[in-house]
Amino acid sequence: MSKEITLRRVFRSWWPLAASWLMMGFELPAVSAAVARLPDPNIHLAAYGGVVFPLSLVIEAPIIMLLAASTALCRDREMYAQLRRFMLVSAAVLGALHFLLAATPIYDLVVDRLLGVPEEVRGPARLGLLIFTPWTPAIAYRRFQQGLLIRFGRSRAVGVGTAIRLGANVVTLLAGIAHGGLPGIVVGTTAISIGVIAEAIYVGIVARSVVRGPLQLAEVRGGPFTLRQLLAFYVPLMITPLFNMIAHPVLSAALSRMPRPIESLAVLPVLNGLVFTLRSLGFAFNEVVVVTLDEAGARRVLARFARILGSAATAVLLLVIVTPLGRFWFVRVSALEEGLAVLAGRGLWIAVLFPAFSVLNSYYTGDLVHTHRTRGITEATVLYLATVCAVLFAGVRHGGATGLYWGLSAGLAGYTVQALWLGRRAREVRA
């Protein structure tokens, strides 16, 4: 690229990805709002937020970084073919693992003995987990193809695909609400599965034009990695979200053993949906950093953009907390009972810095991915998980405050430690 790096250029690269992440962020509140309007809302919200979503995230975790890997590596047709084979094998293995967890006695071992989920939540959660089976393979395929589109300047197609996903999701949720007789967990998990499959189909169709055009013309640079080289690059990236996602079922297990477990598990997906929407602005920054750092003067502009973005996202969440917007969101939009809405509103104060940490960690992570020094990302994630587990263990032992507050405090401590370590490793690489 010959144009000078400016904030405007960074914004143009970032906003289509941010739009995609924002629409994905809206998926969680939409599902929670629909489930809250169907029979037995607290049970089904707890099943979704305390079992189905956390366990699905852990299974999906090894392929989450396919987007970053595809963006960084799919520079020519040989690397594309190699990474595509890796994606297909990973999707098949993880999809089979998901089904085995949901359909065999492994489920009882994990959900009952390990997580300690209340008995009334286990049945709906198992049904939802079965419906969620196509989720991981579809996400593996679409994240791989999205990385290719970003690499070759087609990032707007990523946003269009997410709009299709959200549209399919909302239509399914509205149909479920109109029917009124289906369990909330069935409506919610079906909507998400249909949306992800629709997005994967669209992204795959658009990616064909890149595979048959610019990718074929791209100069082959050094040939594909050996399997050892590919694993050395990707495994640290894979471990990172895996350890991050393990924190979710650990959180569910801890909340199930603290005061007010049903209430905490029911509020969790609603609160996560709102906070995730703003955190997603930072997630979109990671790939922008990866593809922009090749250019002279990029680091200074990217750092300034990160400061602006982190401050803006935090300010929006603070505005929700200190104005009637918070109550409107939890009571009118999310349809929470009064007591649960109060619980969620207080929890937001603990989560107010989460969006800023999302931006900061994406900036440092993109820097390390760009230089192929991904070990520091793994180290930071291990420290994050260790910190979260330590705080949750203290909460279970103490047993005084409501579990939700302990869970959010664990996340805040974990993100702080993670950001400090990523920053240290990024500075070492630059030095």
Image (cartoon, helix red, strand yellow):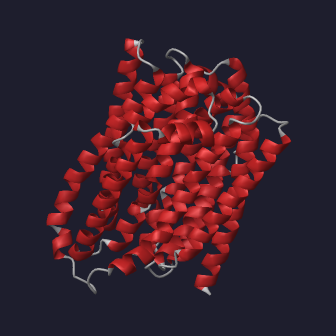
Indicate the quadrant containing the N terminus: top left, top right, bottom left or bottom right. Answer: bottom left
> Is residue 6 placed above or below 310 in the rendered structure?
below
> Is residue 430 placed above or below 111 in the rendered structure?
below
* 174 relative position to 312: left or right: left
Residue furthest left in the image = 212
Residue furthest front in the image = 105
Residue 156 is at least partly visible in this image:
no
The residue positioned 47% from the left and 76% from the top of the image is 370
Indicate the quadrant containing the C terminus: top left, top right, bottom left or bottom right. Answer: bottom right
Q: Position of residue 141 (x, y in %)?
A: 30, 54
Viewer-nearest residue: 21 or 145: 145
Q: Position of residue 230 (x, y in %)?
A: 37, 76
* 128 relative position to 217: left or right: right
Counting every numbered tag in the picture gives: 0
Viewer-nearest residue: 11 or 249: 249
Q: Position of residue 23 (x, y in %)?
A: 43, 42
* 93 relative position to 122: left or right: left
Q: Quadrant of residue 222?
A: bottom left
The residue positioned 64% from the left and 36% from the top of the image is 116
The residue positioned 38% from the left and 14% from the top of the image is 178
> Is residue 110 placed above or below 260 in the rendered structure?
below
* 240 relative position to 353: left or right: left
Viewer-nearest residue: 412 or 316: 412
Residue 384 is at least partly visible in this image:
yes
The residue positioned 63% from the left and 32% from the top of the image is 265
Q: Position of residue 3 (x, y in %)?
A: 38, 75
Q: Quadrant of residue 311?
A: bottom right
